[in-house]
Image: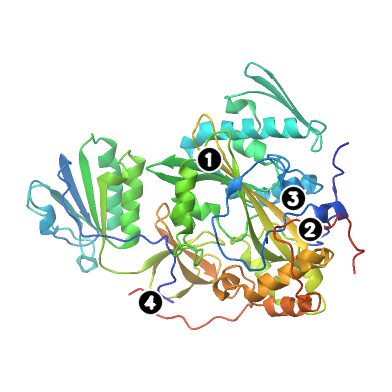
Amino acid sequence: MIDQGIKSRPTYEALRRDPTGRRHLYLCAGEGPAPDALSDGPLESWTVAPAAAEGTLRRPQGEGERRFRSSRQLLDTLGRRLAGERMGLRLYAEGPEDFLWDVFGIAQDHGLGRSEVFLKQSGTLARRVQCVHCKTFNEGVTTTIVRCAGCGANLFVRDHFSRRLSAFQGVKIDAEQPGDVPQAERAYP
Amino acid sequence: MGIEFRRDERFRESFSYRNSDAGVLRFPFPFGEDRYMYSVNIEPHTRGGPSPAFAHAFDVDEHYVAECRERALVLADDPGRCQVLPHMMPAQWDTLELLMESLSADYPEHFSLTKDGDAWRWINRPLGLDQSFVFGRPETLPCPPFEYITRQAQGDFTLQDQRDDNLFVDGGMVTTQADWSLDFDIGMSFHEWHGPVPLAHDIGVFDRALRFLLRLQYGQPVRRLNWTMTINPRLDTSPENYPDWGPDRTTVTPENVADKVHLRVELQTLFRLPRSNAILFGIRCYLLSVRDIERVEKWRKRLHRVLTTLPPELAEYKGLTRYRDTLIAHLAAGDDGAALSPGIQPDQTALAARS
């Protein structure tokens, strides 16, 4: 059930510094630090405080380091930052899949090309799932079947992934035989 | 002589959809052999060939008016069925031009296009439209150009942008689809949007098809047939509305199988567009009930053979699993095993009365 043989899923490689870049920005949905393969030269590093910090923020001391209360806050700041950027920036993002493709989408909106953004999945495998019927996004899904927070349908989490939406597709599992809902399995811890 | 349109047809609720005898015989039956497997099966979209449905760039038939009305109903419920990414405006105008020029040249009794520089006048007689507008100026049309013209055409359309040696589905009008979502897939690359299709990836079909399409030339469109099955003559079998049409698949019985089950054929055409270098992909949908298929001896026998040899992965993907055995049992009696001619043509020019 976990490998459904669907080919729209991205694959990820370890982050490596792109020598053609002139400035390098590492974005992490967790606490970091940046992998050594990136740190061979000047690197800005944006990270996110753990939930245990409960909104408190200890600002890092290192050159080019920033810390955010949430990945949402990091992404909003990224949008403002890229609005004023010039050619030569390389982005390196590390975190759950929805975070990665949110970064990618923001980068695209600001004119960065596919070859200027590098992504590496880490941390939770939990999925953002869009209900194909009512279009509600269900965040942090760890099971093969999830009840849609929008329309209440029991959605099968299909391995079909949209980079634009940073989301997997959820399809009502018992559409043909209403009520015939198998036990959900924990699949994306 | 023009086409006689069946204006009262419905593709929902009452399902008052029928094919005339001529409509049955012009159906683009998709099986040229007794077995079916995925292949690239692309051929030049030249006029003529084994089905009258190939006679024009964009086929118009007796269901035209009713299908345009059905499209309007779907869009009223869900405007997201028509979306085009902002950078595709040149491809929108390319599409409008190609459809208007083709329809007016192929069906002059129903459509006319006159041009005075950029001042164009379009007349669509079956739908009662008379529109003057300025080519290249979206504000002179009642809606964006791609939506405007595809509301007046049968079948779905998508726009593929070509960049980075790939094709991206960056727009579409998708209201008569076989269970895929434009709203979810828009912006995807060629392999991404075909991701859910089983088996074909592993035998290299999509690699070859993409390489072929990247080289598609202006003025040399191509076509292929694809197929699935649908319960009731329902055009909108979208994933969005699957909770509403999915239960139909459990309603097939030996008594109603011939009337409920329809073979759904997509005549897929691909046109390189001149200004944008994008590709217009037409997905023209034809529905024919098993009862009408049975009136053509060759098609009746061949459909039986294709279904009995269909790989289970394909039956599952096409959603046939629940009623396939019922359908095969029904068709078995009409197949004596005699050899059939290769190709899709019906091999007869008149039909027996409906059984």
Give the chain letter at badge 2: B
Say which quarter of the image contains residue B12.
Answer: bottom right
Give the chain letter at badge 3: B
Q: Nearer the viewer, residue B48 or B354?
A: B48
Q: Quadrant of the C terminus of chain B?
A: bottom right
Tags 3 and 1 both on a single chain? yes
The residue labelled by disc 3 is B51
Q: Residues within 10 Å of mark 2 (few under 14, many from 20)?
A: many
The residue labelled by disc 4 is A187
Give the foreground label among 3 and 1: 3
Q: Is residue B144 visible?
A: no
The residue labelled by disc 2 is B346
Say which quarter of the image contains residue B235.
Answer: bottom right
Q: Amino acid at mark 4?
A: Ala
Dot 3 falls on a residue whose secondary structure is loop
Q: CA distance from mark 3 to mark 2?
A: 9 Å
Give the foreground label among 4 and 2: 2
Task: Using residue B196 as the reference point, say whether residue A189 is left or right of it.
Answer: left
Tags 4 and 1 both on a single chain? no
Q: Nearer the viewer, residue B65 or A64?
A: B65
The residue labelled by disc 1 is B279
Tags 3 and 2 both on a single chain? yes
Say which quarter of the image contains residue B301.
Answer: bottom right
Residue drawn at the location 58% of the way across and 24% of the way down: B137
Q: Residues within 10 Å of mark 4 (few under 14, many from 20)?
A: some
Specify the farthest residue to the top: B117
Q: CA distance from mark 4 to mark 2?
A: 50 Å
Q: Amino acid at mark 2?
A: Pro
Asked if disc 1 and disc 2 are in contact, CB closer than 8 Å, the reply is no
Q: CA distance from mark 3 to mark 1?
A: 24 Å
